[in-house]
Image (cartoon, helix red, strand yellow):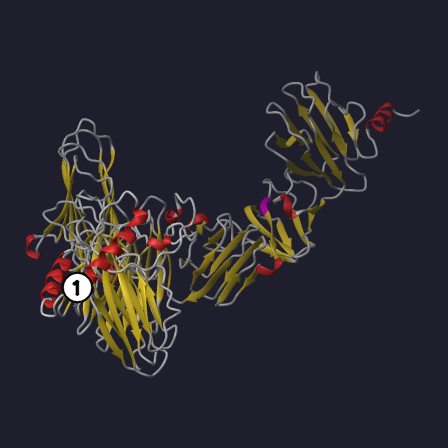
Amino acid sequence: MVPVHLILFLLAISVEGILAISPCNQTFTGNVTVSPGEIPTNVMNCTFNFSINPNSDTLMLVFSSLGCLSSGDNITISADSKIITTITSENDRVTVVSTSNFTVVTLLRGSGNKTLTFKLDYKKECTQEVDPSLGFLSSPKHLPLTKKIIKCTYNVISPEGQITLLGFTSFNFKSGSLNVNGINVTAGQNRTLPDDLLIPSNTAIILSLPSNENKTEEFISILSLVNDDCSNKTFSVYDNFIYTSSAGAVCHRMIDGPNGTLVVTVKSWQTDSLDILQFRDGLSQEDKPLISGSSVKDNIVLVSSGSKMSMHLEFKPTIKRRVEISFTSQASGGLVKVGSDITYISAMSGGKDGVFQCTLDAGKKVSLTNFNMSNNGTVEVYDGNIIIGNPVFTIKNTSLPIPVFMQTNQMTIVTKSVLSSYTFRATTGMAQDCDQFSQLALGSYAVKSLGPNDTFTCNLIILPMSKADYGGTIQLTSLDLCPGDKVTISEGITSLNAQKELVSFTYNSNYQFIPQLIFGADKGARIVTALSKCDKRQAGVVVAASYDMKTLSSVCGKQPQSPSGTVRSPYYPLRYPVNLECQWTFENKNNSFLYLTVDKLNITVGNSLKLTGDKTEFDFTADKTLGKDLIFSKSKDLILSLTSVSKDGTLVIPGEGFVINYEYLDCGGSRNANFSETFSGDKKDCRWIVSLPKTTQDSVNAISSVYIIKAKLKVSENYVPGSLTVYDGTNMTVNTLNLANLSSGKELTFLSRVDTIIIQYKNVTTKNFTLAVTITGYLCANFCQNGICMHDEWRCNNINDCGDNSDELHCSAPPPPSSTPSPQPKPAPKEDKGQVPGFWLAIMLIIGLIIGILLPFIIPAIFRRMRKRNYNRMTDMDNITTDDYTPMD
């Protein structure tokens, strides 16, 4: 007769292990999968009995959560009536081994659950194939063993091109062992966790669990797949890591160097924001990360406490990146773990450099409170982990004169050529008093209030630095003042070094925009914050500022050295600082000419921008020079000066500054009348700015009295077509005039659009050349909408001569082209402007006839009288001559 329990078993198990009837209170020798709804909702306890295989000494069960357990559910796995482990909704996968005859799995259900799904994998031996993508691997749960040693084998399978990083988060063995590729894994002396391992695919991990142990032995590890081509373990003293691919990758590098410590430098970190980089001070998971996440940037330096360091990188698929990281070893130096006062003593051999680093928890500041050298050498102290640029303090052949306070939680000390021992003490930064002294090259400062009843005065004193060509900058970053409060910033710290008030702020001050302030590095600076009682004051920052010492040349910018270039005000297009004095020198080069184009100009009233030199003094702020080109002769150096010196602490908001382009020319100048010049063959680039002054507006006729130029060019026989260019306006970005009909020995006449033209000659030969220019001023009667003088022949000729098409507006039909106007007085307004040219032509013919019949002795008197009248009305500029530039509005 067939036993009843066997019939139930055959009905319960399908080929794939899915139950057809309720599995509760059954005995199994194979896998079990519980599907939703197979356990009745009214069943509170469901027991699964697993019988051990007669041919095996070990039973292994792997619990896998295929769905999810409710918060009220739990599963207990027991053997010999003793609970091995309890599974809750937080567990996804648990492995259990036993040497008992059977294992009982009990499900205790807090409430009916029709979606409960899990799987129990039965194995007669403790063996598993491990997929590293699961992310973890741990020893099986078990009771203290009483029979024999249990061996569990894990086969780790990695995909092609990848290897597995095995890192331990728990490791408790006394008599048991863990063997990876034939090597026993141990934690090492004074260590709790073994070093991480990089293992290839098909690696066997063999766990041995001994008998007669009263305590369970176990390990817990994390698994991570890494790229084989960028991950390795090296024992090299020097190791460089360079990665430039745009593909995603995970790289792990482990450095195990000789005795001493390691220094890692991130030379380049041009990556995506999602990329991850982490350094550990050692090779195991118990070693503290040195840096990770967004703190990584170019040029950071990290130091280990020993000879081991690991690097883990995760690159997301993104744009092409460049990462370059170098590792070097050092005989002296290392990571100083600062939690309280520590004295570190070291002796350097051969005067080699050493790098030390002290790091505190975030939010704390580190300080260097003592440093004594017993011999010659140099010590540089840096705030943070970047040692490029100026240190915050330098000690040479002596001891530290005063404490140095860092502004961050990290300090890097670089010792150079120290031939004997030295001692330094790094301490946890204390809360600073209200008054502070600073010898740092850069830093920040904040005054905090506890609330309405706070009344005090605080000082920040930035001590002077004896460095040539150095200046300091102060930038207030926050102000929250009440009535009666005052913040004063002064150059100099006492009356002994000419203390001068730069600016002060009160409750009523306009500090929506707070400019940067400049002070002399040799004088130092002082910030005084005086707070009065204020019922509305809240606890928090009242004043915050940053300061920086830098060379004046770095503030003002480079000197003009090239034959052509651009000079800008500091920080353009941002506003230039207060108390600024910057100079740019244009050196005299063979008595050449200086050609300037004012591209941008915004100088606040009270500040100045001037060009000075021998017989030259030009004020850019007094003349409307924006958009105009200027030319100056140079017998000596010319100096461009920008000054924004504050007066009596009154804040004057600086302007955005200027942008001026410059060129050195062989010849040229400014002209207001006829001129003729002959060039030798060695003159290659010459320019003339030819301009006419403007008259006042005619209030009677409401006609703008702006003049245009009628110019006649005459060239000598050696003229090369194309070497002469005429720009119709105040700068060389405007339209050029058509000189196609100008040839050797000939002359060409044309009309300008405004009161200025620029003539440029570029010599392409070695022969002499002569240019004669005759100019006449004409009053403009009609204007384009953009302000250009509208020539009569432009009207309705189907050509956009104005540039804004206003000469083609209100046209019924294109008129015939008119001839170039002759010299004439200022026109009177007419209802029909189309008759004006003919009317004036008739008047001029009559006047010419009268003049023709006058006696010869009367002609000079009439000519002088008319010339005097015309000069006063700016209608004829033939006899105005000058060799030097005359500024114009």
**Location of the N terminus (image quadrant):** top right
Q: Nearer the viewer, residue 179 or 827?
A: 827
Q: Secondary structure at mark 1?
A: helix
Q: Nearer the viewer, residue 722 or 305?
A: 722
Position of 453 relative to 203 (above/below): above
Indicate the quadrant where residue 535 lies. top left
Residue 778 in the image: above or below residue 53: below
- On screen, residue 837 above or below 423: above
Q: Which of 282 and 379 lies nearest the eye of the viewer?
A: 379
Q: Quadrant of residue 534?
A: top left
- Specify whether residue 496 is in view: yes
Residue nearest the observer in this picture, 804 or 245: 804
Percent x, y for residue 188?
52, 55
Q: Is residue 220 magenta?
A: yes
Residue 438 point in image, percent of width and height: 20, 52
- Residue 220 lies left or right of residue 739; in this view the side is right
**In the displayed image of the protein, which residue is found farthest to the right?**
1
The location of residue 37, given as percent across then percent down, is 73, 22
Q: Amino acid at mark 1?
A: Ile
